[in-house]
Image: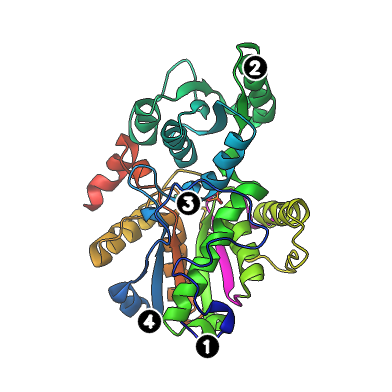
Amino acid sequence: MGSDPASQGTPPGGPLQLAGEPPRVHLAPLPTPLHHLPRLSERLGIEVLCKRDDLTGSVLSGNKVRKLEYLLADARAVGADTVVTCGGAQSNHCRATALAAAQLGLGCRLLLRTDDPSVPPPLEGNLLLDRVAGADVRFISRADYARRAELLAEEVARLSTAGRVPYVIPEGGSNALGAWGYVRAVFELRSQLAAMQWRETARDVTIVYAAGSGGTGAGLIAGAALADLEARFVGFAVCDDAAYFQREIARILAELAERFALSRLQVPREIEIVDEFVGVGYAKTRPEELRTLVAVARAEGLVLDPVYTGKAMHGLCELQRRTPGCLGTRVIFVHTGGVFGLLTAEHAGSLAPLV
Ligand SMILES: *Cc1c(COP(=O)(O)O)cnc(C)c1O
């Protein structure tokens, strides 16, 4: 433990209960490990650590599990018997929701986006796990996905009429309640950094993450404010643009501050988002991104995913190569999971020439 009296006697996962923290169900084995990536560090000329949030479970794994601990506690508290959520056909969030719902004895209804709902997408990767977990799946077009709020409301009405008690979880589990998952993750990190004597130099630490719907970024930034961790946070967008994520993260932070009366929480003046590595679009990959994914797997035995973490890692490596030191000299890469997205015929096809 460091010299900070506040951290004396704190368990390694951070405090058992955070001030203002809503109830949670324990789904993930926490704290997740913080691993050194020695060969990648040497290659990049900076120290790179990895917060292993891909280890929040086996099939129930990734960043969504942290959010679901709070969202599903709330679902239970209001007496829900079915959760309803939405995402892409290979959504990690939907797969984690389907499995966690089964674990808690809840039903699960998923609205999954696909190009042509009359031709169901292949039963593989996350979608296969959704079905194995017993989720009730409805495919919807991109046009319908754009009005998902309406469709979710329709599902709620339909389930209610059928005598069920539905609970809606937003896309990516990204709201103020879900963001608590990453507030807690920052308290874990603070304890882990203190144990490494890094606490004093947290100012020199840059925490890098992939941004998909903004909930992880909002939770991390809120956690830093609440845990007094003066780190820099850099989100790599995997869709949309920097302005979109700055807006979304600010919105979730404001909702967090208001709903949980966190007077210490302020929306920072600058929310750092890098949007030049979105590449050819959400869930679409370029060979250079996959080459980075393969290189990291071979150097460190760390498997990233093609949709989120692979892009963020590629961005980190590219920025450091172009402008050494621009992300500082100590980087913590948050591995938010997603391996099942890799295990699809589409990505296998793109990876085949590289492996
Ligand atoms: C959802 C997801 C993200 C993005 O997290 P948000 O909170 O939606 O921004 C990053 N990585 C993986 C693997 C994910 O499934």
Give the mark nearer the N terminus: 2 vs 1: 1
According to the image, label 1 marks what residue?
3
Residue type pointed to by label 2: Ser
Q: Which of marks 2 and 4 is in front?
A: 2
Q: Which of the 4 image quarters holds residue 126?
A: top left
Mark 2 and mark 1: Cα distance apart in space: 54 Å
The numbered mark, 4 or 3, whose residue comes first in the sequence reads: 4
Residue nearer the viewer, 283 or 75: 75
In the rendered picture of this protein, how many numbered marks are placed on residues? 4
Q: In this view, does 263 lie above or below 170?
A: below
Query: On screen, 288 above or below 94?
Result: below
If you read the primary sequence from the N terminus, does the residue marked by circle 2 or circle 4 appear first?
4
Check if residue 131 falls in the magenta segment.
no
Q: Which structural element holds mark 1?
A: loop
C-alpha gap between disc 3 and disc 1: 30 Å
> Which sits in the foreground, 30 or 79?
79
Q: Mark 3 vs mark 1: which is more N-terminal?
A: 1
Residue 160's label in the rendered image is 2
| Quarter of the view holding residue 184 | bottom right
- Whether tag 3 and tag 1 are in contact, CB under 8 A, the answer is no
Query: Spatial distance from mark 2 to mark 3, Cα to Cα?
Result: 30 Å
Residue in view at x 52 percent, y 78 percent: 205
Instruction: Tell me: is circle 3 under 8 Å from ligand 1.
Output: yes
Q: What residue type is labelled 3?
A: Asn
* Marks 2 and 3 close (CB-CB < 8 Å): no
- The CA span between labels 4 and 3 is 28 Å
Residue designated by label 4: 45
In the image, the segment drawn in magenta is 229-243
Label 4 neighbourhood size at 10 Å, few (<14), some (14-19), many (20+)?
some
Inspect the image, locate mark 4, and give the three-letter code of the amino acid beneath it: Gly
